[in-house]
Image: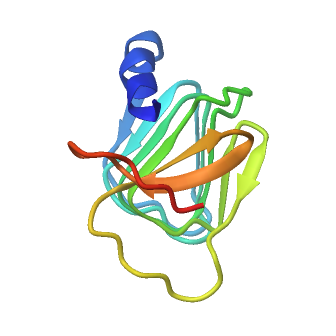
Amino acid sequence: MATQHLLETAKDQPAVLIERTLRSGQIVHYEGNLVILGDVNPGAEVTATGDVVVMGVLRGTVHAGASGDESATVIAFRLQPTQLRIAGYIARSPDGETSRPNQPEIASVRDGIVTIEDFPIGGERSGKN
């Protein structure tokens, strides 16, 4: 589902690669897909009209599908955003420390709800609403 979307849109939209950690106060906006090699720290803001992939820990604010694309996704090694938006849907991390995932996580909109799951690496997806 969401992984198929990534494969399809990767060919349709431009992408930019940011090779650094984003700190508090830094803002990135891109018309297309956005890949960040580093963390997104609290106070940093990331917005893309397409998908957002963070090769690190996402603890700041992220908005994928900013132009209204409900099929956009957010992927990170660890999802702990201050706020996560996909199109018009908003979610945030639960209060308190959560268990550390064993693999990357993916956030997508399913049936009008932002869901966070383990990123499928050759197996079935298990939802963690």
Task: Name the residue located 33 percent from the left edge and 57 percent from the top edge.
Answer: 104
Q: Position of residue 5 (x, y in %)?
A: 45, 24
Q: Quick check: 98 above or below 73?
A: below
Rendering quarter of residue 64: top right
**Does residue 100 appear left or right of residue 107 in this picture?**
left
Q: Position of residue 84 (x, y in %)?
A: 64, 55
Q: Quick check: 78 above or below 15?
A: below
Task: Name the residue located 34 percent from the left edge and 55 percent from the top edge.
Answer: 20
Q: Nearer the viewer, residue 48 or 23?
A: 48
Q: Residue furthest right?
A: 88
Q: Nearer the viewer, residue 76 or 41?
A: 76
Q: Quick check: 92 above or below 12?
A: below
Q: Quick check: 109 above or below 119?
A: above
The number of numbered badges drawn on the structure is 0
Q: Colour scheme in the image?
A: rainbow
Q: Nearer the viewer, residue 115 or 38?
A: 115
Q: Position of residue 116 (x, y in %)?
A: 52, 56
Task: Name the residue located 36 percent from the left edge and 77 percent from the top edge.
Answer: 100
**Does residue 94 appear left or right of residue 90 in this picture?**
left
Q: Position of residue 53 (x, y in %)?
A: 41, 44
**Does residue 114 appear left or right of residue 55 in this picture?**
right
Task: Name the residue located 25 percent from the left edge and 46 percent from the top edge.
Answer: 123
Q: Residue furthest bottom?
A: 96
Q: Quadrant of the C terminus?
A: bottom right
Q: Residue furthest left?
A: 122
